[in-house]
Amino acid sequence: MRPLASWVVIGALALIGLFAARDALRSDEAPASAPATTILAKQRRAPPVEEPRIVGRQRIAAELRAMGADGVLYLTDANCRRFLLRLPSLVWTPQGLPGPLCPSATVVDERFGLEASQVDADIIEVRSEDWSLRFQGTAPAFRPEGRLTFIRAGRLFEWTVQCPPAAERVVFRGFRALARCPRPVRGAPEHLQELVWLNGASFVAVAGPERAVSLIVVRHGVATRIFNAVGARMGALSASPRGRYVAARVDESLVLFDLHRHGALAGGTGARAVAWSPDDRFWAVAEEGSIAIFRATQPQTAAVSLPLSAYDLSWR
């Protein structure tokens, strides 16, 4: 095992000089067993390719087995080819999404058959196979129960079926047709730039003016500031499956936050992507030429390093 060369594990209140320290709607919900919201991958042509060779496979597999890491790691390479690697055996598997695939900024709700993306600076398009709608807004995201949210003029809105009598409605045509209207999300703070949902009542957001933004967590309408950025841009938020960890791009760095500790766990300029295990116990960080797997609750310990190159990661 070895730690990453440029991935730095840090204390709760220190981070590469960029931060100042701490300062359901029943008819449009999906069943609890429904699949989670995913990020769409756009397909494009690429020549067939052999699966990458893993040097030291048996030794690394033994380290992963001792660590307790399991599941399937989805790796996307520089040519948008996706490979599926089973852990801890390090066996390539053909099951799952076929390659070649490229990650995109499109968000997908698999339960209602809808996807949404930012198609212009302030225009969002939501669509299904044979229907689409464009409207003003930024930062499209699906709540876990399936409602589409967006930001307009710093305020958080959602498309809901619970509309006032005089509200103008639009029929969303996914797997089933539902008449919806946009309305502000109650209890959400203002001056929002971007967010990611943790569950139906909680989200993490970037809020504030450019170059003076804060990372906040909002639970049941109560906002708590986690970090302030000093002269830096923050965005590209992603959350772990169980909502304990959040990753953000801060200028050129990828930074991980533990929402239970209200502090940053790790950060570095060499990280390309991060993915969490489905149970939040581990995270994988892709750097140039390697992927390191950490214990989430013990990031100071050495990582298991896989000699593989990836530009995007997912863990299932």
Image (cartoon, rainbow, N blue to C red):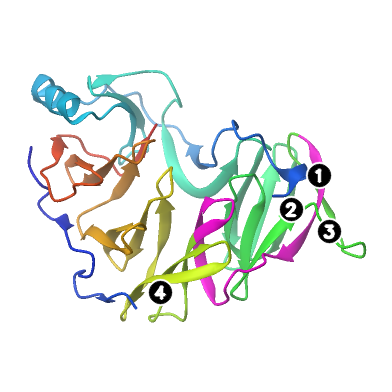
The amino acid sitting under disc 2 is Leu
Camera-side residue: 288 or 190? Answer: 190
- Of circles 4 and 2, the one toward us is 4
Judge the density around disc 1: few (<14), some (14-19), many (≥20) Cα neighbours within 10 Å: some
- Which x, y percent locates residue 48? 35, 23
Q: Circle 4 sits on which residue?
A: 214
Q: Earlier in the sequence, mark 2 or mark 1?
A: 2
CB under 8 Å between discs 2 and 1:
no
At numbered mark 4, what does the secondary structure look like: helix, strand or loop? strand
Q: Please tell me which of labels 4 and 3 falls first in the chain.
A: 3
Amino acid type, residue under disc 1 in the picture: Leu
Query: Which residue shows up at 22% across the image and 41% down it?
Result: 295
Disc 1 + disc 3, Cβ < 8 Å: no
Quarter holding the N terminus?
top left
Point 25% across, 30% down: residue: 69
Q: CA distance from mark 1 to mark 3?
A: 12 Å
